Image (cartoon, helix red, strand yellow):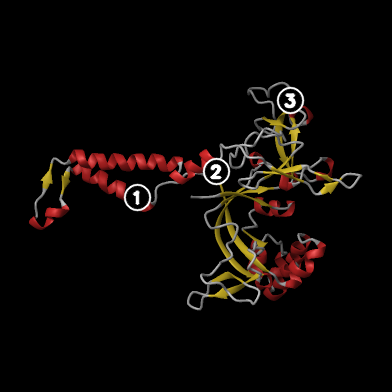
């Protein structure tokens, strides 16, 4: 089953994805540890050349059985991109006409269908807009990408491959696939192009690292990273799964047997007897597979059970990063206790988590 997860990109990288230049992203390997774990070491399979990160104890010994560091995103996962965004009301939009466009029922010159957006103070009709689309983004009050709701996502990606590597193992093709732009005349000299691409990517990478963390995670520190390859895909809500190829082939075979209405019974196959008139039994099996296909589209038993459990209201965790004038912490965010999705207290008033459907305890409204 494909998981649906959010991923953050800055404006430059969003533009690179939209332009088709960026097909890979690198993210730091930053696992969480148990009390008896102190780090990880990367082991290489000599037969396949594949790498795996194993957790180690205080004496740098691995565990038995091994404890592997699992990448946050797996091949097949669907990612929706969170980018710098805003919501623009129709009343404030230069593309909105109060009278329909002649010959149509549309009121938007960009041919967008307005949606309803509710925040703490009001409900408005308008559209989501994105900083990557605006040449002069300073004229609009933009909201951080981490606060972008799933409903506003316009870029959807499917993870096709993931591997662990040192950051400085990157070569020219890696820089280009990361979206780095290198002038054609420089590309004529591969060595010069790789050096130029490396310098540009180094600047991009270091711009995403906090100043106090550059000694540990900056380009010169050469940290371990997850390299995620991806491709653009259509929007999906996740959940459920299609039947496997083997199951589909089984259905096709059984339906073929049913149409022939001829079956060789296995327990008397040694007598080479052919039986006809067993159409009812074959139809029963085929019907079971058809029902299985329908239920697979809904979800597995475990997924349905998890959906029921999410209807039990739980109190979200409130938090914040700032303080008021008296030094008291300001709680302006809350987190879903199930999927850990973050929301703004002032704007995101939900009875259920939009990401996973978890019911929120309303005894202390957010």
* Residue corresponding to mark 2: 236
Identify which residue is drawn at 32% across, 50% down: 249
Q: Give the left or right position of residue 322, taking residue 100 as reference.
A: right
Secondary structure category for the residue under label 1: helix
Q: CA–CA distance between discs 1 and 2?
A: 23 Å
Q: CA–CA distance between discs 3 and 2?
A: 32 Å
Task: Quadrant for the C terminus, please.
Answer: top right
Tell me residue 326's x, y (percent): 91, 45
- Sequence-wise, the earlier of marks 3 and 2 is 3
Secondary structure category for the residue under label 2: loop
Q: Quadrant of residue 190?
A: bottom right
Identify which residue is drawn at 16% across, 47% down: 263
Q: Give the left or right position of residue 74, taking residue 136 as reference.
A: left
Q: What is the crowding at mark 2: few (fewer than 14 residues within 10 Å), some, or many (at least 20)?
A: few
Q: Give the left or right position of residue 261, taking residue 42 as reference.
A: left
* Residue corresponding to mark 1: 247
């Amino acid at each position: 089953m494909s998981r649906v997860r959010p991923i953050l990109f800055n404006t430059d990288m969003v533009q690179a994805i939209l332009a088709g230049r960026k097909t890979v992203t690198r993210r730091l390997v930053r696992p969480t540890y148990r009390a008896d774990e102190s780090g990880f070491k990367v082991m290489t399979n000599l037969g396949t050349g594949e790498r795996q990160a194993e957790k180690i104890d205080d004496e740098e010994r691995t565990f038995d059985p091994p404890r592997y560091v699992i990448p946050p995103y797996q091949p097949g996962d669907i990612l929706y991109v969170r980018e710098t965004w805003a919501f623009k009301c129709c009343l404030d939009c230069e593309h909105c006409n109060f009278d329909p466009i002649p010959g149509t029922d549309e009121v938007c010159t960009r041919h967008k269908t307005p949606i309803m957006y509710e925040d703490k103070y009001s409900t408005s009709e308008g559209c989501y807009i994105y900083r990557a689309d605006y040449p002069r983004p300073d004229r609009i009050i933009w909201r951080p990408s981490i606060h972008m709701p799933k409903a506003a996502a316009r870029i959807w990606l499917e993870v096709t491959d993931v591997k662990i590597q040192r950051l400085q193992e990157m070569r020219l093709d890696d820089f280009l696939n990361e979206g780095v732009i290198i002038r054609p005349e420089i590309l004529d000299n591969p060595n010069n192009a790789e050096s130029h691409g490396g310098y540009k990517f180094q600047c991009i990478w270091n711009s995403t690292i906090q100043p106090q963390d550059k000694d540990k995670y900056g380009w010169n520190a050469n940290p371990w990273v997850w390299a995620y390859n991806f491709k653009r895909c259509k929007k999906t809500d996740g959940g459920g799964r299609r039947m496997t190829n083997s199951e589909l082939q089984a259905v096709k075979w059984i339906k073929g047997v049913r149409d022939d209405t001829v079956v060789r019974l296995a327990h008397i196959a040694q007598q080479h007897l052919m039986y006809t008139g067993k159409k009812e039994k074959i139809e029963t099996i085929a019907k079971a597979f058809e029902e299985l296909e329908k239920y697979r589209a809904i979800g597995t038993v475990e997924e349905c059970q998890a959906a029921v459990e999410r209807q039990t209201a739980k109190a979200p965790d409130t938090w914040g990063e700032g303080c008021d004038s008296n030094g008291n912490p300001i709680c302006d965010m809350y987190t879903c206790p199930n999927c850990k999705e973050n929301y703004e207290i002032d704007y995101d008033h939900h009875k259920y988590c939009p990401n996973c459907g978890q019911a929120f305890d309303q005894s202390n409204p957010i």
